[in-house]
Image: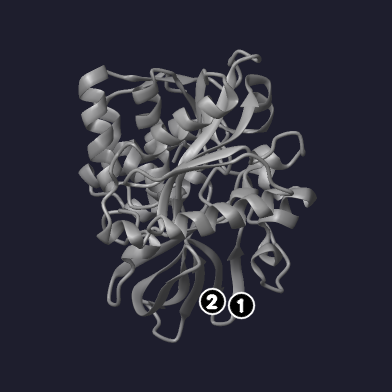
Amino acid sequence: MKSKITIDDVNALGIGAGILGTGGGGDPYLEGIQLRRELEKHGSQTLLDPQMIDENVLAVVVGMIGAPTAGIEKLREGTEIIRAVRLLERHLGQKFGAIVIAEIGGANSMGPLVTGLQAGVPTVDGDGMGRAFPELQMCSFLLQGDVTVAPLAMADAGVATAVIPKTKTAVWSERLARNLATSMGATAGLACMVMTGKQVKEYCVPYTVSLACRLGERVIQARAKNEDVSDVIARSLGGKVQLRGKITDVFRRTTRGWAQGNLTVESFSDSSVRLEINFQNEFLIAKENGNVVATVPDMICIVVEETGEPIPTERLYYGARVAVIVVPGAAVLKTSDALQVVGPRAFGYDIEFSPLPGDLPASGEILHD
């Protein structure tokens, strides 16, 4: 695993986290600029090994909540997350000793690193999803029931802030926070799921920051060597290239704080083969000519076919030449209890989860070609 993040890691992290984000988490471009700026000031950000963390340290989960489509037109102010963290500290009367990433996907992999630099505390090398999901209750930290979403704090790009001290359930926390984020301009900084280092160690998906960096480095290397980048990505994560083709249809709308819709990819080699993909911030279900080939919590990743550059849901467009890669999800997400929260039926699809072979690499290292 990596022990720190430096300015030299930012490009690779953005590529790798964009792929792991399965279309969600936000486009990492602007967050990458801010992370570079903070690293120029501070030199590096310490990564905490989740298996070596002080069990008594107080940790907080952070990220941006809202619709990634809003980020295309609405720039972040840059202090939304740290303001939410400080507000929650004041509410609790305690200081946090570690920052935890809610989801490794896209921009939400970088915001917590920026927050750690701004707060002067390390960021854990791991997250609560091993990918990105659209709703708070889908974090691995909540599966055992001894961690709660609330109390939580939120901050917008202006001066507005809010604390929700307590809610009935994680689903209610999601509903309230999502509605508040919508009122704050469709995106907001979030600090929530306060826990001990012991709980971080037990519940996080480990070493996903390291994994994102290693994956991005391998993509950059593959480009330089003129390798088949899409195939390299698939092999590195234990997945496969499901289809190479052109996006022939995209329907997308921003509603209730999410980017929702579907797209169709037509195969380069056989125009009668089409892949239909549904998304809610993230890609959820993939059907090839009507037959389900991948579902959440396994990962559906769409990249530019020639370069391996990840394409988030808010930047899908007609005519894009893409590769659709399917990758097994993290093991913790595929238990019977977890599937009730992150499986296809949790999103309203009457589909049984049929897992892809294997699990997402859990060591922070990509698989060897």
Residue on which the image places disc 2: 288
From the image, tell me which residue sits under label 1: 291
Label 2 residue SS:
strand
Q: Nearer the viewer, residue 68 or 344?
A: 68
Residue situated in front as seen by the camera: 149 or 50: 149
Residue found at x 56% / y 19%: 94
State yes or no: discs 1 and 2 in contact (Cβ < 8 Å). Answer: yes
Q: Is residue 142 left or right of residue 276?
A: right
Local crowd size for mark 2, using a 10 Å CA cut-off: few (<14), some (14–19), many (≥20): some
Residue 117 location (% of width, % of height): 35, 23
What percent of the width, then of the height, locates residue 328? 58, 51
Residue 233 visible in the displayed image: no
The answer to which of 202 and 224 lies nearer the viewer is 202
**Residue 308 left/right relative to 125:** left
**Label 1, residues with CA under 10 Å away: few <14, some 14-19, many ≥20:** few
Q: Seen in the image, is 108 located left or right of residue 96?
A: left
- Looking at the rendered structure, the kind of residue marked 2 is Glu
Q: In the image, what residue occupies the spot 64% across and 27% down?
A: 195
Q: Is residue 320 positioned above or below 214 on the image?
A: below
Q: Is residue 166 left or right of residue 235?
A: right
